[in-house]
Image: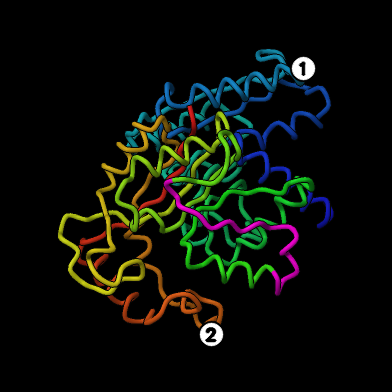
Amino acid sequence: MSQSARRRFLAAVCASALVDPLAFLTPVFAQAKAPEKVKRIGFLWVASQADQTKDISAFEQKLRELGHVQGRDNKLEYRFASGRNELLPDQAVDLVRSKVDVIVAATNPAIIAAKPATTSISIVMVVANDPVRAGFVASLAHPGGNITGLTFDVGDDIWGKRLELLKEAAPKMVRVGVIWNPDYCAGAVLLNRLTGLDDRIEVHKGSALEVPFPDDSFDAVWMQNVGMNIADKRKLYAEVYRVLKPDGRFAFQEMAAGKAVTSYFPLPWATDPADSFLVSAEEIRSALAESGFVAELFEDTSDAHLSRTTADGAPSPLTLAVYVDNLAQKAGNARRSLQEGQIRLVRGVFRVK
C-alpha cells in the first residue's frame, strides 16, 4: 500500500471511530471479495456484555447491510471481563485457541492481555492510550509486530495530525467541539492565523455551563483540564450531553481529588484553593452516569504519568508556558501533589445513550 493510500485508509478509520469504535472494521469487509472460508473475529472487552450491546449491535447490523452473513461469511466470538481485568489473560488465550483470524482488543488492559497470547494473529487495538510508551508498538509510523489499530491519546504532538486526518476523511467538516480553558482562546485564534487555518477552525468563547450551540450539534466533544475549575459538575456534564448527537462520544482528561487534601499552591489550574473544585474519580463517574452517559473507558493514569521521564533534546518553545505564568513552580506543585496522592489524573470516553 502506498503512503498516500495508507493515509487515506487511516483517515477513514479515525473519522469513523469518532462515532463507533468498531466502525473501522467495516471498510475492510466492504472492499473484500467473498471469503473462501468463514472469517473468525475475536473481541476482547474489559466491560460487560450489557455495556457493549449497542456497539456490537451496530457493528453486526452494518455487516448484514454489506451482505456478510454470520455463520456463512464470518463468525464473531466475544469475551467480556465485566470489569474483572484478571480474567483477560485467560480470555485472550481462549480466543487464540479458538483460531480466530483477528483479535479486537478494546482499551489498554485488554491489549496488555492479548499481546503475549499470540505473535501470529493480528491484534487490532481500540481506544488505546499511548501505545508506544505502553510497549504495544515500536512507533506510530512503524508499529512492527502484529498490533495495529486506534489510539486514544499519544501526546500533544499528534493533535495537528488528528485534525489533518479528520479533515481529509471529512472534507466538508467545519465543526469539531473542544471544551478548553477560555484563556487559551486568544492564543488559539493567533495560532490559527499563523498557520493559515483561521478560515477552517472556529474558536468560540463562552461558559461551559451554557454552551452556545443547539442540541445535537456534535459527534464528539473533547475536554482537557477544564472541570477542575467548575464547581457544578452535573451542570457541566448535562451541557456536554445536550450538544452531543445520539451515540456521540465525550472524551476528557481531568485532575481528580486524591485521598489527601490538596495543599500545594499555586497549581496550573488554580492560584489558590478558592479556584480549585476537585472531586474524586468516583464522583466524576457518578455524575456522568446521572447525566445519561455510558462509560466506554475510565482509567487512572497517575502512575503512568509519574513514570515518564523528560525526553532528551532541547524543549519545544511552544508549551503551556505560552499561556500559564510561573509554570515551573505550578507544574512542580502538581507533580508533588500527584506523588503524595493529593490529586489523581484520570481519562475517560463516555457515550451518549
Figure check: 178 above or below 85: below
Kindly report the distance in space between the C-alpha atoms of the residues bearing marks 2 and 1: 53 Å
Residue 103 appears at what percent x and percent y?
57, 35
Which element is circle 1 on?
A: loop
Figure check: 98 above or below 13: above
Q: Residue at x 81, y 57 (%)?
A: 3
**Three-letter amino acid code at the position of disc 2:** Gly
For residue 238, the mark is: none
Q: Residue at x 41, y 44 (%)?
A: 109
Tell whether position 146 is magenta. no
**Residue 272 versus residue 22: which sits nearer the camera?**
272
Asked if residue 238 lies left or right of residue 96, the reply is left
Q: Residues within 10 Å of mark 2 (few under 14, many from 20)?
A: few
Which element is circle 2 on?
A: loop
Asked if residue 117 lies left or right of residue 281, the reply is right
Residue 316 appears at what percent x and percent y?
55, 81
* Majority secondary structure of magenta residues: loop
Ranked by sequence position, the earlier of labels 2 and 1 is 1
Q: List the residue tagged with mark 1.
A: 67
The span shown in magenta is: 193-209
Residue 149 appears at what percent x and percent y?
61, 46
Q: Residue at x 56, y 78 (%)?
A: 318
Figure check: 154 above or below 112: below
**Residue 306 versus residue 74: which sits nearer the camera?**
306
**Residue 54 versus residue 134: which sits nearer the camera?**
54
Q: List the residue tagged with mark 2.
A: 313
Residue 161 appears at what percent x and percent y?
67, 60
Within the image, what quadrant is residue 56 found in?
top right
